[in-house]
Image (spheres, grey):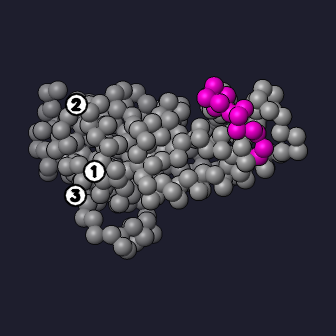
Amino acid sequence: MLKAVLFDLDQTLIDWEQVTEPWEQYVQRNLKGVLDHVNAEIHPLNGIELIDFFEAHVATVTTAWKEGVITLRPPHIARVLAQALITCGVPKAKLDTEARAQVYQAYEDHWVMPAGERAYPDVLVVLPELAQHNIELGIITNASHPMQQRDHELAQIGILDYFPRCRVSAADVGWLKPHQAIFEQALNLLAIEPDEAVFIGDNLHADVGGAQRVGMRGVWRINSAEQEAQQTADLDIVPDGKINTLHELLPLLDEWYPDWRHNGR
């Protein structure tokens, strides 16, 4: 019996291709509140401009992601912010646990979603269809931000309420997809078995391969021919299904779980 459909977040539910604000501008805008808080409350960074903090942040997060690809340990935005501030001259002793929490809170308080971020149009049609038939919905994302922050985005693009029980971020779990622990966290939240769920994502290795490794069906969302060619070049993962739009997911569910539309849960 199909009990749940789980999704990757970015480029599966959320479309970043329509964002119009330059990435550098977006990141600096969200870092400004942190720098202002640190200068006023923790340690004055005389001579350090926003661009300097931005460059330290980018260098820190880039290094963290390179390590994460090897270790499957995700960057966490709170650690990234602290390390970037240390690089900019804040004494490590001044960034104790409380101060780091304040730094992250300043970041979250001043965060604003970039212009143009949206849910894919098919998401706004298919999620209600699944929910109407009592299918649980969940999210598993390799985000470096805690889910409480990603929830702000989900609320603003109008899909948060479809995921009441299962929203899992790598930053919270401590593991990146395809590690089995992050998938198992989602299954445990919903109290279901792997063969009762289907996972959809745009990354063949992390999403499809990771889901299949724990016993779920893995569906690959292909957003472009370039994406498909790049990801299949060196991988032997065979997805259970390939889709270009979530509308194509429903016939797959009909094939695999003929009674799912009559789910009595």
Residue 201, how many percent across, how many down?
36, 52
Residue 52, how many percent across, how many down?
78, 50
Tell me whether circle 1 and circle 2 mark residues in contact (CB < 8 Å): no
Nearer the observer, 196 or 144: 144
First in sequence: mark 3 or mark 2? 2
Circle 2 is placed at which residue position?
191
| Residue 225 visible in the displayed image | no
**Residue 90 is inside the magenta segment:** yes
**How far apart are the alpha carbons under marks 1 and 3?**
10 Å
Residue at coordinates 36% horizontally, 73% vertically from top-left? 234
Q: Amino acid at mark 2?
A: Ala
**Residue 244 is inside the magenta segment:** no
Residue at coordinates 26% horizontally, 33% vertically from top-left? 188
Query: Which is in the foreground here, disc 3 or disc 2?
Result: 2
First in sequence: mark 1 or mark 2? 2
Corner quadrant of residue 115: top right
The stretch of residues the image draws in magenta is: 88-101
- The local secondary structure at tag 1 comes to helix
Q: Is residue 157 above or below residue 239?
A: above
Circle 3 is placed at which residue position?
240
